[in-house]
Amino acid sequence: MTAQMERRRLGQQLSVLANIKGVSQVTLARECRISRISINRFFRGRSELKAGDLLRLLTLLGIDIQAEIEKNLKIDLLSKLSVSAS
């Protein structure tokens, strides 16, 4: 899958999530401090967001990316320790 296809897929998935949660593009834009057009372009896979803007967007949609990273680190560390002990 190309980077553009991945970007489009992520934007579409987050757009669906925003709709399910009832959060408008206007609200997301205001809370992320970026334009509604930028949100719309991101949702359609036409542009990228800066890391900080994406983190705010994910947080507004109830996704705690920091917790996901920590969870994966623990799983990977436990897996590595388990293999090393064998």
Image (tube, helix red, strand yellow):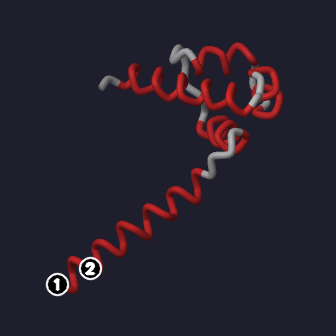
For the residues labelled 1 and 2, say whether their Cβ atoms are less than 8 Å apart. Answer: yes
44 lies left or right of 33: left
- Rendered position, 54 above or below 13: below
Q: Which residue is mark 1?
A: 86
Marker disc for residue 82: 2
Of all residues shown, which one is farthest toward the bottom?
Answer: 85
- Rendered position, 36 above or below 10: above
Q: Residue at x 68, y 45 (%)?
A: 62
56 lies left or right of 81: right
- Tell me the kind of residue under disc 2: Ser
30 lies left or right of 80: right
- Tell me the kind of residue under disc 1: Ser
Q: Residue at x 64, y 40 (%)?
A: 58
Tell me where residue 1 appears, x and y as whole percent.
30, 26
- Which quadrant of the figure contains the C terminus? bottom left
- Is the residue marked by circle 2 packed among few (<14), some (14-19), or many (20+) residues within 10 Å? few
